[in-house]
Amino acid sequence: HETAGLSAHQLVVRRGWAFKVTLLFHQAINWSKHSLDLEVQLGSLSERFPVHFTAQCYSPLRWSARVFPDNVHSHSVSVHVCSPVLSSVASYHLLLHIQSHHNMYNYELGTFVLLCNPWFKDDPVSMPLEVQLQEYIQSDYGLVYVGTHQSVRQQPWAFGQYEPGVLEACMQLLQVSPQHQSDRQADYLRRVDPVYLCRVLCAMVNCNDDLGVLAGKWQGSYMDGVSPTEWTGSAEILHQWMASSCSPVRYGQCWVFACVLCTVLRVFGIPSRVVTVFNAAHDANANLIIEEYYSSTGEKFNLSKDSIWNFHVWVECWMRRGDLGAEFDGWQVVDPTPQEKSAGVYCCGPCPVSAVQKRCFRCPFDASFILASVDADVIRLIVRDGLVMGRSVDTEWVGQLIYTKSIGSDKPENLTHTYKARSECVEMIHVCLSGGPPHLEVSLDMEKAPSMGDSICLCVTISNHSSHPRFLTEHLNAQLKHYNSCPTRTSGGRIFCVVFSVLTLHHSIQASQYKFLLTQDDIVNVAVVIKDMRSKARVMAAQEFNICSHQISIEVEGGDCIQMKKTCMAHVSYTNHCGNVLAGAVLCVDGYGLLQNKLALLQPGESIRASVSIVASSPGTKLLQATFSHSQSPGVVSRSFHKISVHN
């Protein structure tokens, strides 16, 4: 049933497929004088069905059982039990009833867990290709793409669906959900539907309405929990949630919420993948317009309820949408990060990706919110003393890049075209909104992708489309920000005047101005405002980018293919390229299935090196991960990972 490794303590099977139960008796049985019935119980619900001793086919709509002739013996019998393809995902009790002319014998055989079956064509979550099933159900590691659309970083995540206790935690999620607590029978009956399952589980990954897994936090101190950037896998989070009697684990942000949901969905047999939207809009008033406010010197203000995150991570799950029609089958967006309520609950989706592409605003669930996330217009306003001094419209910034991990590869797959397919009509609307081409244009670009310790080199190009020269003032402003917030600190700014017809200006921000302020997850927001001194008109351009950190080196003695349960040595090192001795330097190493506990290694100096012994507890692809931080930086400075293949 493709469930090996999910549990060592109970039978785990998939709906629509038969499983075998062998009954052993202490005395000989004359089967011509006895009849067998099986009964499955789910809470107060039960279904009793006969065991046929003939070559009768399984029923696709009801529970059924049969015995093959060569499985019948005087002291034993093997019964093949098959569930309907639309069975509820749950833990079932299995009972046996034996009837003779004079007696009735009743036995409780045990419990089994029934999951969705993406290998079975009649299941709504079935996928056509084996390579897809290996990637979106069976693979227990993945990559999350973060940073900015100009400088994409990948960081690993251990989904950990085969770790002990993870299946039990996922089952517990359903049992403590508000739907189950308010009406258990109705909840059990509705668990046949992957749409229903996705909505319940999406809401349960965050704790805003229920006994959910994760509490979110995006600013302030994380001293009373774990910083979201420190998590590397789902199993540790789910274990902590179970051990605390369903108290929320602190803390998560979008990629943590999404990766935990991806783990839960894969456990239940719903194909899923983690997707990153770069420049994702949060449209609070649902008008598909995001307003950004800047000062006349290029400083960005936090004046709008709308926002744009440099990246936002959600989940796509695969299913047929019998409730909507075949045109909406396939990938569906499910977003567990608590942003806006859906039907009174903090969950989002499942919404067909095809509905977003076709701009079906009213398609359930939450199509308009998701559409704005990938395709809203950005209006940038220059304000001074409460008055708008300049205005520009950017129709391309939001949803500029949408990535997921490729099948069988660590390379990203670009999904942007699956979400965005603009028509000529839409393009015309965008041109009209922008008010036509201005007489003065400005663009802002990086001369090269900056690395930690390097100067940030910027190029401002100003184009004058009028027939006369202009007397202009340029203001350049750089601010640090987190990926999901407005800038808070100004790094630098320069002001000077030029008279020109066409001009290119170059600027640099020295490393001394930023190097101890930046973590791996910080973003630099740069804006340039050009003012025409005669007309007082202003134009602006803005860019956001992250500064690349230097990689942590990870090497395994003897190569990257190791034998299970055999001790190997791994060497981990980080070299400081900033030119300063780093106080309080910490190198953390961890890896599911390789190390029992996370190792924190403290070592001062310009570089930090360590050797750790690893022992693989199970076969497959494992990840050895390392993070580097120091006391002069508020968070993780660098993160790296290394793939290791484990064989028996």
Image (cartoon, grey):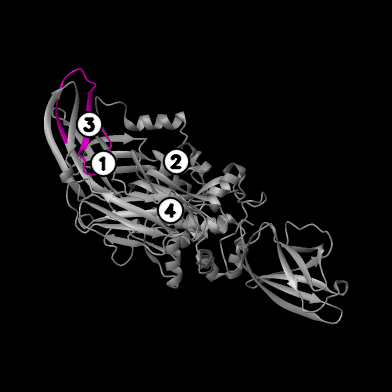
Q: Which residues are magenta?
A: 446-475
In reply to whether residue 452 is colored magenta, the answer given is yes
Question: Which mark lies nearer to you, 2 or 3?
Answer: 2
Which residue lies at the image location 45% right of the left edge and 38% below the top edge?
A: 416
State how far apart marks 1 and 4 are (Cα).
25 Å
Q: Is residue 319 above or below residue 615?
A: above
The residue sitting at the left extreme is 496
Question: Disc 1 marks which residue?
Answer: 451
State how far apart marks 2 and 3 are (Cα).
30 Å
Question: Disc 4 marks which residue?
Answer: 623
The answer, for residue 480, to whether it is visible in the render is yes
The residue sitting at the front extreme is 558
Q: Is residue 194 above or below residue 529?
A: below
Residue 491 appears in which quarter of the rendering?
Answer: top left
Contact? badges 4 and 2 (CB < 8 Å): no
State how far apart marks 1 and 2 are (Cα).
22 Å
Contact? badges 4 and 3 (CB < 8 Å): no
- Please give left or right for residue 285 compared with residue 438 in the image: right
- Please give left or right for residue 330 compared with residue 526 in the image: right
State how far apart marks 3 and 1 are (Cα).
17 Å
Question: Which mark lies nearer to you, 4 or 3?
Answer: 4
Which residue lies at the image location 83% right of the left edge and 59% below the top edge?
A: 55
Question: Disc 3 marks which residue?
Answer: 459
Contact? badges 1 and 2 (CB < 8 Å): no
Q: In x, y percent, where is residue 286?
A: 40, 47
In reply to whether residue 87 is colored magenta, the answer given is no
Question: Disc 2 marks which residue?
Answer: 411
Contact? badges 3 and 1 (CB < 8 Å): no
Q: Is residue 87 above or below residue 23?
A: above
Under mark 3, the amino acid is Cys
